[in-house]
Amino acid sequence: MADALIAITVLWGFVFIYAVMATMDFGAGFWSMVYINREKTKATNIANRYLSPTWEVTNTFIVALVVAVYSLFPSAANILGTILLIPGSLILLLLALRSAFLVFSNIATEYKKPLTYISGIAGIIIPGLLISVLPITHGHYVDIVNGNANLNLSKLFTSPNEYAFIGFAITSTLFLSSLLLADYSKASNEMEAYRVYLRDGKILGPISLIMALLIMLTLKSEVGWLYTKMMEDLPLLLISVGFFLIIGYGLYASNPFQKGVRGMPRLAVIAVTIQYLIASYVYGKAHLPYIIYPNVTIESAFTDPNSFKAVFITYIVGFAILFPGFIYFWSLFMNDKRYLRQKGN
């Protein structure tokens, strides 16, 4: 059981890292589309400058996530591959479409606007499809027929809980990306774009909190076993909500390090990341021991212990090599003044 817990923790870590990075990435593509006709704000330039070096890095984590599922929980991967055939295929199609159109929008400049619109719309649909995996694992939409698992799409897409998750994914995507782009705009000294993205963060923050509350309400009525277990960690959930006050302070307070500038978006980005980390921990803990309720548990789906040790050592070595590189990349990305101030002046 200890090895299985370590394995699911590694898997959930990949999910969280990808969720945070991807929401910021997808949201930046959407904002690039929204502000493409507002050249004076330079908001689209900021979004494109953020997208350019990060979307390739973000996609590496979804590869690591898929490999982790198949290597650590192979029998669960077989069932997930069956029930996620349709939503998974849509996700892959939209990811490919978005990636291709992002590349072509920088090459075929005469078609830049329509390509940007298509990639932006695809980017905001993808988070909604990705988060749909979570309600599916609650088990109420999976029918077992002659030993085979089938996804009941009509039941899934008539569930208020499903739409609460989708709404949360979309609003969180826009909220996190607006905060990060506000921080990035300030670092680039593009103050008009900074004010635009800070305003968007102020609007979307309360909406994302409301969607999170809707998730809890719909869980209570539709997935009682999960809601009950989450309520066992109510203090942590309240702490998570409490971080919203820090986010609000980061959005509205005067910046003590920069006179005449309101808002500290970097503080808000850190606070919202911690907030989501706590909430995801509570959700993940409550979901245990099930991968797909009630038939697939982490124990029943776990790989051979010897295979796990080999895979786990490989992950440790891989991250020991890659993680410092990601940190260095991010520090260059946020602090290289030549890159921060290009294309926008």
Image (spheres, grey):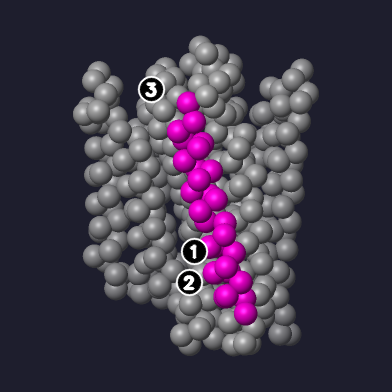
Residue bearing the label numbered 3: 195
- Separation of disc 3 and disc 2 at Cα? 38 Å
Q: Main secondary structure of the magenta part?
A: helix
Residue matched to label 2: 9
CA separation in Å, label 1 and label 2: 6 Å
Q: Secondary structure at mark 3?
A: helix
Instruction: Look at 48% across and 16% down and name the residue there.
Output: 41
Q: Position of residue 171 (x, y in %)?
A: 46, 42
In the image, taking residue 274 as reference, residue 74 lies left or right, namely right
What's the mark number on residue 13? Answer: 1
Q: Marks 1 and 3, how far apart in space?
A: 33 Å
Viewer-closest of 127 and 72: 72
The residue that appears at 35% across and 69% down in the rendered structure is 230
Nearest to viewer (mark 1 / mark 3)? 1
Q: Does 86 sit left or right of 260 as displayed?
A: right
The kind of residue on which mark 1 rests is Gly
Counting every numbered tag in the picture gives 3
Is residue 197 at least partly visible in the picture?
no
Marks 1 and 3 in Cβ contact (< 8 Å): no
Q: Residues within 10 Å of mark 3 (few under 14, many from 20)?
A: some
Q: Position of residue 61 (x, y in %)?
A: 60, 56
The percent coordinates of residue 318 (x first, y second) are: 59, 64
Q: Quadrant of residue 51?
A: top right
* Residue segment shown in magenta: 310-337
Looking at the image, is 278 positioned above or below residue 10?
Answer: above
Horizontally, residue 98 falls left or right of residue 181, namely: right
Q: Nearer the viewer, residue 201 or 217?
A: 201
Is mark 1 in CB contact (under 8 Å) with mark 2?
Answer: yes
Q: Position of residue 227 (x, y in %)?
A: 38, 69
